Image (tube, coloured by chain):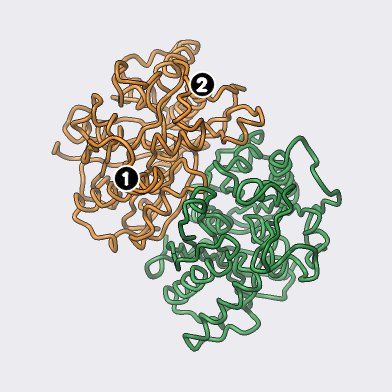
Chain colours: A green, B orange
Amino acid sequence: MKTAGRQTWLFETEPAVLATGTVAGKLESEGPLSQWFDVRITKDGMLGKSWEVDEQGLIRQATETALEKAKLTPEAIDYAIGGDLNAQLTGFYFGLRDFGFRQLGLYSACSTMTESVALGGLLVDTGAAKTVIAGTCSHTSTAERQFRFPTEYGAQKPETAQRTVTGAGMAVIGNTGSNVVVTAATIGEVVDFGIKNPWEYGAAMAPAAFRTIQAHLHDTGQHLEDFDCIATGDLGRIGHAILRDLFAQQGQDPGDRLTDCGMLIYAPEQSEVFSGGSGAACSSLVTFGYLLEKIRNGTWKRIMVAATGALLSTVTSQQQESIPSISHAVVFERRGRVQ
Amino acid sequence: MKTAGRQTWLFETEPAVLATGTVAGKLESEGPLSQWFDVRITKDGMLGKSWEVDEQGLIRQATETALEKAKLTPEAIDYAIGGDLNAQLTGFYFGLRDFGFRQLGLYSACSTMTESVALGGLLVDTGAAKTVIAGTCSHTSTAERQFRFPTEYGAQKPETAQRTVTGAGMAVIGNTGSNVVVTAATIGEVVDFGIKNPWEYGAAMAPAAFRTIQAHLHDTGQHLEDFDCIATGDLGRIGHAILRDLFAQQGQDPGDRLTDCGMLIYAPEQSEVFSGGSGAACSSLVTFGYLLEKIRNGTWKRIMVAATGALLSTVTSQQQESIPSISHAVVFERRGRVQ
């Protein structure tokens, strides 16, 4: 296969996004992107016997929806590729175990979405697979339980905090049969700017997004202006402002084309969304539900999604470690007619 | 690239294992495979400021060792691919962050080793990378803290329990330049036999190993006899006996060629090793240190390693969930002269 520079894959066969399935939690379904999601959960609180089982239900339902839209049975899928934020990826593995997929579990925190699409695209592009399903899930209450405090404590959060998105987004990627294709992926390195405050993911992750976007432009000889939209994973409003500063320091101005999935998914006036959304499902919901639709319907021709992951754990936080971050980027383009 | 059946990749360019680096903990260094490890830790107890920092040191040192033996600088590595058992893969990400590698984090519990080699082999075979480094680490004390009880409790364990291996194994995989090559990989599906006891990993994982080995044979039209050795990841003595029963039920007898990394790494008379070793580093230490050396030195020509992962987390255990398991297999062969 074709590569560019030191860390970019060029998918010459242009793997197609055959269909996507998105399932949004209640708050996400009440946000500005509501109309773009396939399934909107309207009930508040726990639906099953635990938050974790609820989250497994999200990825299962997103998978069923994507398969149904692609008119495929589970048997038509060669590999399921993805992950979630739970320790040991129990959302991904438990949620999909009944489909009988060959499963490749990945983890790079909230950049797991683009890691999944990058490797899924690679498998299809190289012929290692005909059809894969790739994506992520997250749940605000499983993340609170794992990374922060029991919800019952009612711990106050600062304005730099981000809300973990409840939802799941899955994409069926195959050889051909859609006007949205994956044309490139850039794999990121770990960037550590020494941020230690787990309420400041945006600040920790902005340098990783900056590094990966620059690496992509450098590897491919392109410019910010070559993209109709560049969406980072989930920096939130504060991280987004920091990323704009990093570009400005290099004399670059991405203008309106630079946006962020964590900013798009909630309206600032929604309750307790703070600096914006985060979580492994933030970029998969926004990308698969909304951004790809804008390619499909003719608004855009070519976009980059650079999801960002904060690589902390409860243990590293308690041990006063910094928060290393990573970002992987993928490029989606329209081919053929508007649908 | 070439595939076989529904879940097997055939690496026609035969990516070469250029060098391996293995770092073994104290108990592992006192075991029967001691002579085969590059670095043997002789000091007991905590070496740095935490068990987690110690584990990060293991994967860092295994990486430095592999690079040194391959006579490569970190800049020569395109991607680092791997993982560990810690929630959010902090061993892999923190341990390797200073090398500046592009990092692809994977998780499939103790089968992360073969998932890493399978995807690393794929990257090199397809030209997505020239050279990668792949592998895993684990540490008995980070695993105890995460999955079981504080060591200070002195909780008694049953004979079905397994000891998490302390160590790390990394392999540099490139286009050419070694007499050991990776020729195939089979990606597994999740198998759940309803085992709920976290002291019975072997019973939970044996069906996954069986399924993946059979899938490999079915996909490639081969037989057990086509391999000089078939090593499962870490079933331990009890899981190994169950796997033999599963073969026997199909009228198959793998004979002496079937072994298990969890059985090989400790002698039964070593202290507190119970049914044998487990942990993400069990199969990487045994494979990279010992099994590949037996190919290199001419004892064997062709082996299969089917590492096995128990996909539980503390949360799923406490929620009384079963333990789904998975196994990915890779095939190593000798090409050219014995070294």
Q: Nearer the viewer, mark 1 or mark 2?
A: 1
Judged from the image, the secondary structure of the residue bearing numbered disc 2 is loop
Q: Is residue B79 left or right of residue B34?
A: right
Q: Nearer the viewer, residue B166 or B131?
A: B166
- Residue A68 placement, left or right of B203: right
Answer with left or right where residue B47 lies relative to residue A126.
left
Chain that bears disc 2: B
Is residue A335 among what the camera can see? no
B282 or B332, which is in the foreground?
Answer: B282
What label does residue B58 carry, if any?
Answer: 1
The single residue placed furthest to the front in the displayed view is B152
Label 1: chain letter: B
Query: B181 above or below B128?
Result: above
Q: Residue at x 72, y 49 (%)?
A: A153
- Kindly identify the amino acid type of the residue bearing the numbered disc 1: Leu
Is label 1 in a helix, a strand or a loop?
helix
The number of discs equals: 2
Residue A10 location (% of width, % of height): 47, 65
* Quarter residue B181 falls in: top left
Q: Residue at x 58, y 48 (%)?
A: A83
Q: Which mark is residue A50?
A: none
Which badge, 1 or 2, comes first in the chain's sequence? Answer: 1
Same chain? Circles 1 and 2: yes
Query: In the image, residue B285 lies at what x, y percent?
Result: 31, 36
Q: Which quadrant holds residue B235?
A: top left
Whole-angstrom CA distance, mark 1 to mark 2, is 27 Å
Which residue is most to the right? Answer: A42
Please indicate, yes or no, whether residue A170 appears anywhere in the rendered image.
Answer: yes
State the residue at coordinates (36%, 63%).
Answer: B100
**Which residue is rendered at x = 35% and y = 27% of the image?**
B261
The numbered mark at residue B200 is 2
Q: Mark 1 and mark 2 in contact? Answer it, CB < 8 Å.
A: no
